[in-house]
Image (cartoon, rainbow, N blue to C red):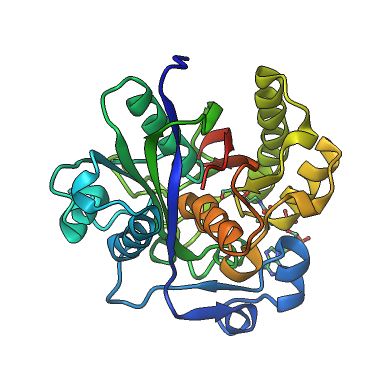
Amino acid sequence: MCKSINVGIIGMGKALPPRVLTNFDLEKIVETNDEWITTRTGIKERRIVDENSSTSDLATEAAQNALKNAGVSPAEIDLIIVATITPDYKLPSVASIVQSNIGAINAATFDLNAGCSGWVYSIATANAFIQSGFYEKILVVGAETLSTITNWQDRTTCILFGDGAGASVVAKIDEPGFFTFDLGTDGQVEPLYAPGSGSKKLVAEPIPGCTNKVFMIGKDVFKFAVKVQSKSILKLLEKLDMDINEVDLFIPHQANKRIIESACERLNITQDKFMVNLDKYGNTSAASIPLALTEAVEQGKIKKGDTVCVCGFGAGLTWASGIMKWIY
Ligand code: UT7
């Protein structure tokens, strides 16, 4: 990796729909209860968009907040990447809608689909563009309206997901920000996909009501997540010759508190080293890490000079981790 150009995050922002859906609300929709959801996942409530809002609306608001916090004008942005699995349309991209909404007249645009790892994949992509000298400032957004692809008859998945967006301004900077990344895929469809949502003809629904909605074999994804999370983090630390105690805060994908607990056990670190906000928002896929990162900064859990490790996993099956110095 070329070391001559330093790259890092210079501002973060978030957006959340106002409507709250609690576990008690879900008790009225499917056969479930607050106690089961809380003990098995840690989730208490999630945010859901109303029928007039879309992924690009959340992405736009988060992007505007990130630009404001970074002190960067829309015209300075060279590229917008939106990580999402819930675009407004099959075409055009959410990124192109955000470009128009915020007036980023000089920005190229594309969406990136790497499931819940999407935002980390996107900042690694932004890092490569800037390190190559091609661009200087890139807006990276993770935005989802998972409620629009949730099978509300399936209690094993509908209790998990929520809507939201997190955005970051990634820029060429003077000091080292991003240290390194680990991206990977174990190409598998069946554990986590949306049957009938694309060009592949659906012969039979794996379960009723899942056409064009999320279908997941939870146990398989759980096992994958538990293994890959600690493995990827250890790989990064080894690459950097860094001790785990040098990391001030881990920002894991907010899927299930038991997955986070198991990472702590495997890595032999205490849970206060892991940012958790899934109790309030559930699993927001590509938005989950930037949302948690933004809140960690807002709550003073990350300060300038801290070392931060992000780690995502999800559909693909993908994983993506990164270690960075916090520089603002
Ligand atoms: O973001 C992408 C990554 N996604 C993930 O990381 C998700 C990973 N998977 C998980 O988090 C967990 O597998 C789940 C939370 C989805 C499920 O938890 P689990 O401990 O694996 O539960 P299970 O599927 O083994 O189900 C245990 C029992 C079953 O009943 P029986 O067969 O033991 O009688 C289920 O039918 O719990 C039942 N169950 C529920 N009960 C009440 C499943 N869902 C519910 C529910 N409410 N919502």
Give the x, y percent position of residue 120.
49, 39
Residue found 38% across the figure and 52% down from its top: 70
Which quarter of the figure has residue 255? bottom right
Q: Quadrant of residue 98 in the image?
A: bottom left
Residue drawn at 50 percent across, 46 percent down: 116
Q: Is residue 206 visible?
A: no
Q: How many marks?
A: 0
Residue 64 on image: x %, y %: 31, 61
Q: Is residue 300 left or right of residue 68?
A: right
Residue 315: x and y in percent read: 50, 41
Please report the residue visible at 58 percent of the width from the left and 37 percent of the height from the top: 325
For this orientation, the residue located farthest to the left is 105
User: 118 above or below 68?
Assistant: above
Q: Residue at x 44, y 70 (%)?
A: 16
Nearest to the observer: residue 323 or residue 76: 76
Res 113 visible: yes
Image-quadrant location for residue 125? top left
Where ligand 1 lies, by quadrant? bottom right
Please say if 159 is above or below 119.
below
The furthest residue to the front:
174
Residue 173 versus residue 203: which sits nearer the camera? Answer: 173
Residue 97: x and y in percent read 20, 55
